[in-house]
Amino acid sequence: MPANAQAQTLAEEIIRISARLSSIDKRFARFASAVGTEIGPLDMHERIELTARLNALVAKHYGLNRNQLEIILQSFEGFKEDKNLEKLKEINWNDALVRKFNGEVRKRVLPYFNSLNSEESGVTAD
């Protein structure tokens, strides 16, 4: 795929995921329709996965390599992983929850980034 076509594809997915993360209820129906995404609430699992993929896509779009992305991900302090966070039914954002959310997102970014590179090269990461 030509570089400009790849950049366009990345940009379109960045837009789609960003719009989905923002379109949590019917107030965003017109916006979601214009971008071609769904509306409705997201559970914590969906929110974590979409945010991690978005971070990987943005890193790829900016031309970062894996080492550069790792350095960036390691530079943030105060994130805490919590494998039970995905099971959270009611989301009441506070500082502790944001730190856990970002910790869970951070640990998923590199696998998404690796899959983007594998898709580009045609090599699967089995």
Image (cartoon, grey):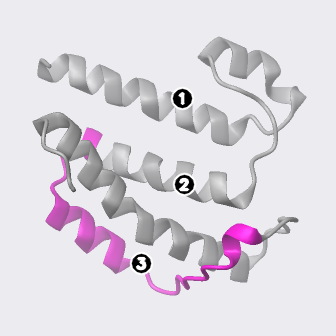
Quadrant housing residue 93: bottom right
The residue that appears at 83% across and 65% down in the rendered structure is 91
Sequence-first tag of 1 and 3: 1
Classify 10 Å Cα crowding around label 3: few (below 14), some (14-19), many (20 and above). few
Residue 105 in sight from this viewpoint: yes
Residue that lies at the very extreme toward the top in this rendered image: 34
Magenta residue span:
60-87
Viewer-proximal residue among 84 and 33? 84
| Element marked by disc 3 | loop
Asked whether residue 63 is drawn in magenta, I would say yes
Q: Nearer the viewer, residue 81 or 118?
A: 118
Q: Position of residue 19 (x, y in %)?
A: 62, 32
Q: Which residue is mark 1?
A: 16
Q: Residue at x 57, y 37 (%)?
A: 18
Question: Magenta stretch: residue 16 in it?
Answer: no
| Residue indicated by mark 3 | 76
- Give the alpha-carbon distance from disc 1 to disc 2, as whole Å: 14 Å
Tag 2: amino acid = Glu
Res 62 seen here: no
Secondary structure under tag 2 reads helix
Mark 2 residue crowding within 10 angstroms, few (<14) / some (14–19) / many (20+):
some
- Mark 1 or mark 2: which is in front? 2
* Left or right of residue 99, residue 60 in this image: left
Marks 1 and 3 sit apart, C-alpha to C-alpha, by 26 Å
Identify the residue position indicated by label 2 in the image. 49
